[in-house]
């Protein structure tokens, strides 16, 4: 349950940070769009892109290690 809670916490934190960027219901789609846009327009980041990227890396690592049975 600790892993699930940690993953949900990371997802919620990322979702809050990029909430105004895209109204997609899927947080993965929202993250992909956000970073695609941010790479082309770095000045558009309202919060540190490095902070979000660190959370996204942790989120995907947890998903891959504990929840997904296939390689990414």
Image (cartoon, rainbow, N blue to C red):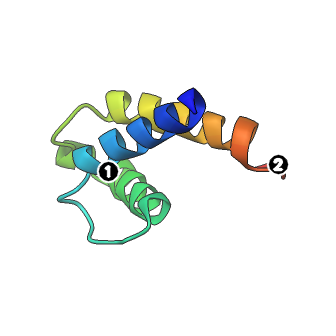
Q: Quadrant of the N terminus?
A: top right
Depicted 46 relative to depicted 41: above or below: above
User: In x, y percent, where is residue 4?
Assistant: 55, 38
Looking at the rendering, which quadrant does residue 13 occupy?
top left
Give the residue number, with chain letter if any, for mark 2: 71
User: In x, y percent, where is residue 66?
Assistant: 72, 38
Depicted 34 relative to depicted 16: above or below: below
Give the residue number, with chain letter if any, for mark 1: 15
Q: Residues within 10 Å of mark 1 (few under 14, many from 20)?
A: some
Residue at (32% x, 35% y) in the render:
49
67 vs 19, nearest the viewer: 67
Which sits earlier in the primary sequence, circle 2 or circle 1?
1
Residue at (17% x, 59% y) in the render:
20
Residue at (42% x, 59% y) in the render:
27
For the residues marked 2 and 1, what is the alpha-carbon distance in whole angstroms?
A: 24 Å
Q: Badges 2 and 1: C-beta atoms under 8 Å apart?
A: no
Q: Viewed as shown, does residue 50 lie left or right of 59? A: left
33 vs 19, nearest the viewer: 19
| Residue that sits furthest to the right in the current view | 70
């Amino acid at each position: 349950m600790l892993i699930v809670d940690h993953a949900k916490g990371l997802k919620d934190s990322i979702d809050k940070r990029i909430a105004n960027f895209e109204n997609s219901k899927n947080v993965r789609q929202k993250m992909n769009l956000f970073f695609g846009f941010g790479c082309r327009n770095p000045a558009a980041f309202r919060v540190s892109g490095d902070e979000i990227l660190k959370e996204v890396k942790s989120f995907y690592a947890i998903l891959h290690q504990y929840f997904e049975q296939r390689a990414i």
